[in-house]
Image (spheres, rainbow, N blue to C red):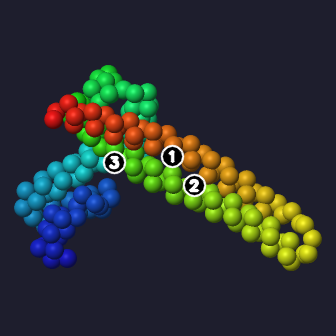
Amino acid sequence: MADEELILLAQNESQHLTVEAFHLLQVELEKRNIDPEVVDQMQTAKEIEKDLTLTAFEQHTAEQFTETVWQAAFDAKENGKTDKELVDALLKMNIKEEYAHMLIQSMEQRTKELIDHYKSEMNIGAGFIIGGIVLLILLLNITGRPVISLWSIVLFIYGISRASKNSKQMKRMQKIADLISEERERDQQLYQ
């Protein structure tokens, strides 16, 4: 590579290189007596990239914590807690106040998204139920006598289980969404 290409590589891609490739690039830059500032910038970019990269454990832990916070917020709303009470509860969980307010502001949208998700899952469950019934009918038509297929039973039971589980979750989220809407309406009436 020409010096200019090597400098561009160092400036634009060094943070994405493996440790070995990064070291080789650094050695090559020094061997060619390229401006030491380029090497310093490259090292700084690599250190920043390293600091910003989360380990798999850290990512998993963050996801679990986020899910725990959402569940706590949903539980509190389901139990009739007001937004103010919910903020206080989140502050006790060491959530920063601005994040607590952001979470509360996004709860209504989040419940709607979850309701849609659970509806989709219920429809998939209904599809499995129908699939089990259709398989049973097809086998009856093919053989001319009642034949119970293990697959038709499995599809039917799985469909019922999936639809039932998601129906419960959807009803819970709908209750929470209704409570949030009622609180928003009360707050609007107070300010009018």
Of the two numbered discs 2 and 3 on the same chain, state the one appearing first in sequence: 3
Residue 78, quarter of the rendered image? top left
Quarter of the rendering occupied by the N terminus: bottom left
Q: Secondary structure at mark 1?
A: helix
In space, the residues marked 2 and 3 are separated at their CA atoms by: 20 Å
In space, the residues marked 1 and 2 are separated at their CA atoms by: 9 Å
Residue drawn at x 78%, y 62% as measured from the top left:
152
Of the two numbered discs 1 and 3 on the same chain, state the one appearing first in sequence: 3
* Foreground residue among 70 and 50: 70
Q: Is residue 56 above or below residue 95?
A: below
Where is residue 188 shown, x and y percent of the image?
A: 22, 37
* Foreground residue among 65 and 29: 65
Q: Which residue position is annotated with label 2?
A: 122
Tags 1 and 2 in contact by the CB under 8 Å rule? yes
* Amino acid type indicated by mark 3: Gln
In the picture, the disc for residue 109 is 3
Q: Which residue position is annotated with label 1?
A: 170
Where is residue 33 shown, x and y percent of the image?
A: 10, 64
